[in-house]
Image (spheres, rainbow, N blue to C red):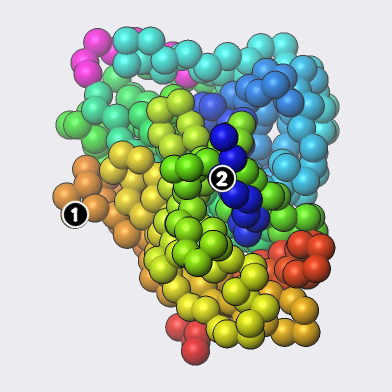
């Protein structure tokens, strides 16, 4: 039974990416590409199938989408790292598969690229020795010049393909390419620079654009539920203020918590500024990101600013910390360069969201 109503000031949306694997050949690059990134995608909206992001040598990505999938370009942009999406193509895959059984990776794909070159890649781990998976945070937003959201990638059950007893093959237009080795052993086993996650949680926080804020019904416990979200509100003087957003996921939900609670829009009209913090925290040992918010009233509008003054915080003793620091020095600090400005027209709740990058060392 509904006890009240309130608006949801922010959006966090789950990507249909379920699994991913990245194959690096930077030491022996092709004329166009130096890495391939395989995604298994599944949802009611997109259907099911595979996508390959081809890492261009200029830092952008080309996207090859299996013809069984329906993905809007505006949604695809949100899940592409590097400098961003350059070209996209719908193609037929002669083969595409991603299996992980008894701790062993078996994945591959075959398709023709934009130059009509045949791309063949497969990896088949056959080793019996166990490998301990990690939780991983890729630096997917590190090189984007024009961000469209705060990209959130949490790669659970993450590992690197082992070299021993593994069949691996990559060819581009008949030219065989050597896949890069990983820099150092893991679990005392030599590895290829082939990263994979069998349980990927990919989301975008507060996507840029223009839309009308959603209004939700709140029950007697302060909860409001939609298909993929649960919202917790606190009531004060008859006004509902947002305490927490939960992006639901079968195994690893993501929570965004506000402290103090995010103000109700009717308070903003009083022209009193509001300041606070919020925390984005996925489940497990992925850590968390702290941000700051401020809300100001200006000529019938609420002006919301979001900043991220601190790096991503990983828990002390996390078993992936050494790998993160060794591979990409700023893999946790790029979040600090993102900031968001949101303008809400308070008479009709029309909102415009923009993201920019800043020099985090010069932030006032």
Place residue 210 in its image quadrant.
bottom right
x and y percentages locating residue 135 in the rendered image: 34, 39
Give the quadrant of the N terminus. top right
Front residue of 323 and 286: 286
Task: Compute the Cα span from label 2 to label 1.
Answer: 42 Å
Residue 190 placement, left or right of 341: left
In the image, is residue 126 part of the stretch drawn in magenta?
A: yes
Q: Which mark is residue 316?
A: 1
Q: Residue at x 61, y 31 (%)?
A: 227
Q: Which residues are magenta?
A: 123-130
Q: Give the camera-side residue of 231 and 210.
A: 231
Is residue 277 visible to the viewer in this orientation of the structure? yes
Disc 1: CA contacts within 10 A as few (<14), some (14-19) or many (>=20): few
Does residue 35 appear in the picture of this structure? no
Say how many tags the image has: 2
The residue identified by callout 2 is 3
Q: Is residue 346 left or right of residue 39?
A: right
Mark 2 and 1 residues: CB-CB less than 8 Å, in contact? no
Between marks 2 and 1 in the image, the one whose residue lies nearer the viewer: 2
Viewer-side residue, 165 vs 327: 327
Instruction: Reply above or below: 241 against 18.
Output: below
Q: Secondary structure at mark 1?
A: loop
Q: Give x and y (percent) for residue 69.
A: 75, 23
Residue 110: image location, x then y, percent: 67, 17
Q: Which mark is residue 73?
A: none
- Image: 141 above or below 133: below
């Amino acid at each position: 039974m509904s006890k009240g109503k309130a608006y949801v000031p922010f959006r966090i949306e789950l990507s249909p990416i379920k699994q991913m694997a990245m194959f690096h050949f930077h030491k022996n690059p092709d004329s166009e590409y130096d890495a391939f990134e395989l995604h298994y995608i599944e949802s009611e909206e997109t259907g099911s199938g595979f996508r390959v992001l081809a890492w261009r040598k200029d830092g952008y990505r080309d996207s090859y989408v299996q013809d069984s999938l329906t993905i809007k370009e505006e949604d695809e942009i949100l899940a592409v790292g590097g400098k961003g999406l350059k070209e996209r193509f719908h193609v037929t895959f002669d083969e595409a598969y991603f299996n992980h059984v008894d701790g062993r990776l078996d994945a591959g794909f075959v398709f023709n690229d934009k130059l009509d070159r045949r791309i063949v890649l497969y990896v088949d781990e056959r080793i019996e020795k166990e490998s301990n998976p990690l939780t991983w945070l890729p630096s997917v937003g590190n090189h984007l010049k024009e961000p469209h959201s705060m990209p959130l990638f949490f790669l659970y059950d993450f590992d690197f393909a082992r070299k021993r007893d593994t069949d691996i093959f990559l060819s581009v237009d008949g030219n065989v390419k050597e896949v890069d080795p990983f820099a150092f052993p893991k679990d005392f086993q030599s590895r290829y620079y082939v990263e994979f996650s069998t349980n990927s949680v990919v989301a975008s926080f507060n996507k840029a654009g223009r839309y009308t804020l959603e209004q939700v019904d709140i029950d007697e416990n302060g909860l409001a539920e939609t298909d993929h979200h649960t919202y917790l509100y606190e009531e004060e003087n008859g006004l509902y203020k947002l305490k927490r957003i939960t992006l639901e996921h079968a195994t690893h939900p993501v929570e965004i918590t506000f402290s103090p609670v995010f103000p109700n829009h009717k308070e903003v009209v009083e022209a009193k500024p509001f300041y606070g913090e919020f925390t984005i925290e996925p489940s497990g040992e992925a850590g968390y990101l702290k941000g700051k918010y401020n809300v100001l009233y200006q000529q019938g509008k609420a002006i919301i600013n979001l900043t991220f003054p601190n790096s991503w915080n990983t828990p002390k003793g996390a078993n992936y910390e050494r790998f993160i620091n060794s591979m990409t020095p700023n893999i946790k600090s790029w979040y600090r360069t993102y900031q968001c400005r949101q303008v809400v027209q308070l008479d009709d709740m029309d909102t415009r969201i923009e993201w920019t990058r800043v020099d985090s060392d010069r932030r006032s």
